[in-house]
Amino acid sequence: MTTASLYVSLLVVDLAAVFLLTPPPAEHRGLYQKDAARGHAHVPRFNGDVRTSAKFAVSINGHGYRDHEWRFDVQRRLLVVGDSFTFGEPLAVEVSTVGQLQHLSRDGPIRYYNAGVSGYGLAHVLETVSKECPVVRPERVIYLYYFNDTRWDGLIVDSTTVVDGWMVPTMDRADRTRRLSQAQIREHIAEAMAQRSFSMSDWFSLANVVNFLRRRGILPLDGETASTASSDSPLLSTDTEAYPPDLSIRAAEILRAIAGSARSCGAAFTMAILPTDWEARLGIKEPATERLLASLANDNLDILDLRQQAEPGRVLRLPNDNHYNPDAAAWAAQRIAKHLEEVAGKAR
């Protein structure tokens, strides 16, 4: 094969990488609005398709959450808070964890109120409980915790904002002490939009197939050498830039405040720790969660650690997404419902 024909063949492969192998860019414009207390929140009554790893339908109720319209005609109300796992990304709402919880109680007097929002961390959850607990007046607040809720920007309540319909960071990822100006934020949006368009120069330089191989660890990233480390232990919170160990104390303070906010409006509090796929399959534990639990050891909080209940080898994630697949969401819902029955029985 001549060099020219080899190059043409690679161009065909690169084009295939664009249209067949490269996931479409995330698309959530219009879903979020600027929120004075939390940086970003849902646009009430939004109804449309959102794309993350896949396209899925999203309907937001009048209170600003992906849930049924809130009515308060039942005595037993449970408020569920958290991030994208609580929101149900990217599942149909009825097979999400909160949707499955509601399904399990369909013949009973319990109603779950889903106040989960993608991109929220501990600081945002605190503001959500402070805002919605007096509205719902639940008997219990359930926080579906995922390890990345303790990432540094999850502890800063205004770490995001909404510009031109896009939810964007307000902090410099390389220097978390520096705020981005409006001009810098718009520049980042423009760069992200430019990456969505097909580039002839990228095609001729075979950039798309190279990026595809880099995402799968076959080629090293720019500026890196090839890694010989196993990908079987992908503990993400070992990154001390994103998860500084000294912030664990701050994370514990916020979690105590969440529990206190629930109690102040007459609700009990439960924290359910959702395992990552790799924690379930491999029996390993994210350091960020371990540090948080160590800081809370003497607080006597009701904590359901689902990492302890995941069967070894169980696959929780979707094929192209770290979020739960429907079976994993059902498993989590069943374990949470059982725990809630047990703690309710003890309280009687």
Image (cartoon, rainbow, N blue to C red):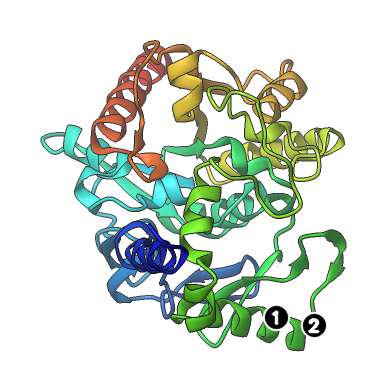
Front-most of residues 243 and 269: 243
Q: Is the C-beta separation of discs 2 and 1 under 8 Å?
A: yes
Front-most of residues 300 and 254: 254
Q: Position of residue 4 (x, y in %)?
A: 43, 69
Quarter of the image with the N terminus is: bottom left
Is 221 situated above or below 185? above
Type of amino acid under label 2: Ser
Q: Position of residue 317 (x, y in %)?
A: 37, 35
Left or right, 317 with respect to 213, comes to left
Q: Does residue 105 appear in this view? A: no
Rounded to the nearest angstrom, the CA distance separating label 2 from label 1 is: 6 Å
Q: Which residue is mark 1?
A: 185
Quarter of the image with the C terminus is: top left
Q: Position of residue 272 (x, y in %)?
A: 48, 29
Type of amino acid under label 1: Ile
Q: Position of residue 293 (x, y in %)?
A: 68, 22
Q: Which residue is mark 2?
A: 181
Front-most of residues 219 and 158: 219
Mark 1: few/some/many CA within 10 Å (<14, 14-19, 20+): many
Q: Residue at x 48, y 82 (%)?
A: 200
Is 57 situated above or below 329? below
Q: Does residue 184 appear in this view? A: yes
Left or right, 4 with respect to 178, comes to left
Quarter assignment of residue 306: top left
Q: Residue at x 19, y 32 (%)?
A: 104
Q: Residue at x 50, y 66 (%)?
A: 206
Quarter assignment of residue 186: bottom right
